[in-house]
Amino acid sequence: MPARDIAIIGYAQTPSQRDAIQSEVQLLVGTITDAVTMAGIERREIGFTCAGSCDYLTGGPFAFVSNLEAAGSWPPISESHVEADGAFALYEAWMRLQEGDIDIALAFGSGKSSPSNPAEVWAQQLDPYYLAPLGADPVSLAAIQARALLDAGRATERDFAEVVARSRAQAASNPNAQLSGAVDVDALLAAPYHTAPLRRHDLPPISDGAAAVIMARGDKARELCSRPAWIRGMDHRIDPHQPGVRDITTARSATTAAKKAGYDGGPLDVAEVCATFSPQEIILREALGLPEGTQINPSGGPLAGNPVMAVGLVRVIEAAARIIGGSADRALAHATAGPLLQQNLVCLMEGE
Amino acid sequence: MTELRTSETKLEFPYSRTTGPVIGAFLAGLREGKVLGIKGADGRTLVPPPEYDPETGGYLGVELVEVGPLGTVQAWAWVHDPLPKHPLDHPFAFALIRPDGADSAMLHAVDAGDPAAMRTGLRVRPRFKTEPTGLITDLEAWEAAE
């Protein structure tokens, strides 16, 4: 049984933006500083640091090492890196805190998608024999998933557009959103297909950005934060990689991760889910078992801003912020990796 | 205004890979115009063949079984503007195709010409390249068989 007294006490994120002029490390410098400031700690109090980023995006091996400059690595620090979203870095840092010998940990995630062609980059991360040589890009895969959902009678194209309209409307109050504002569902449905059955608005924007989170244990968390966002459970699970061997209209590993994180299907005030394409919100709502009345992606979610490698950690931040701010008592955050919701992470948080 | 410094990077895996007795045999099969699968731990025939069972992680051996040649479209997307790395240079469908005799589907291209010609359930046949290169794209595309 993992410790249930580890909490998020500080966080920061950059706005999600296209063609950021700053380098990835420059995006991180201010973000980590702001998270440390919010937590009210000195950097030397951080017992463990874990980063998430993607060398494919930066375009060079070990590109992640330079990101450490933003955390500050002198005097020497204890740190790690995951070639994954910052949410998975948060998981490793949370595991490290379970040991009980340190009180504070930092996790961050960062990525710039603008300088590359994401459709070509992500195809390279697939199975190198059966998928990558086909140039199987995320949009084409997501469109196949959308078709499967339509064929199964589980959603309509209007349902997809309604997810988009609601996400962008909710993003209007999010200063970090890239796409926001009122859009008419009928107007969305009148737009041409991008990759049928998906239209451009069903796709996330191409974004650059960074996010950072400070966690603390027990009394240290209470001392530093008047209302910490307690992590009651966190888990991540993986489905088979090949999309043709699993039911892509669901996300089995998301269901398992939610259960293992301790989510019992009970009331939630907020769920921030990493639905990168609009049909995926419909899939995740069912797979995670989100009850009616749950506010889903009040930040606008990835359809309003998709800083890859930070976008999952941003989901955790948006959920935690509502607990720390007092507007939510119980919140669920979800992050994903791999093709078509292959890997799923769930973080369940509560107020005191 | 500070001048922006830029650098160009080429995204590739400049490696030669040994494809092994399962993936290698599958790719060799394509060269001969055959689509091969493997029996999973639960008896399902999986195409393309994995070396390890996707559910249990157990080793599946090296004995392959021929499937197809015809297959059925399980789900599809229409690619209006193909990317340089896509298998076809004109609009096509990416699809999950279940070859006859298989219990799983493989991702590949359907050279259907027009989205109006595509539907879930469409019967398709493989078209092989005349000059194979050892990649999954030796199966050039699937095309309508109706």
Image (cartoon, coloured by chain):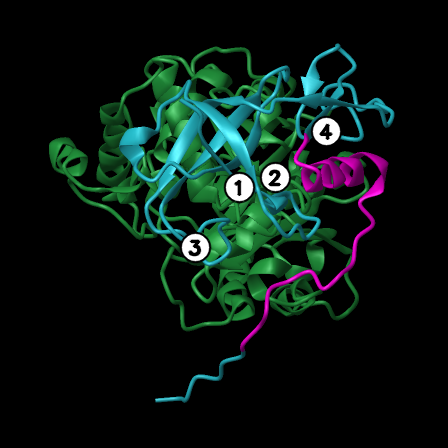
Chain colours: A green, B cyan
Whole-angstrom CA distance, mark 4 to mark 2, is: 50 Å
Residue at 60% from the left image edge and 35% from the top image edge: A7
- Where, quadrant-wise, is the N terminus of chain B in this rendering? bottom left
Q: Where residue A221 is drawn, which disc sits there?
A: 2
Image location (x, y in percent) of residue A16: 38, 55
Residue indicated by mark 3: B83
Q: Is residue A170 above or below residue A46?
A: above
Q: Nearer the viewer, mark 4 or mark 2?
A: 4
Type of amino acid under label 3: Leu
Image location (x, y in percent) of residue B7: 54, 79
Type of amino acid under label 4: Pro
Whole-angstrom CA distance, mark 3 to mark 2, is: 50 Å
Asked if the residue under mark 1 is in contact with the one under mark 2, i.e. CB atoms within 8 Å, the reply is: yes
Asked if the residue under mark 3 is in contact with the one under mark 4, i.e. CB atoms within 8 Å, the reply is: no
Look at the image and give the residue range highlighted in magenta: B8-34
Residue indicated by mark 1: A225
Type of amino acid under label 2: Ala
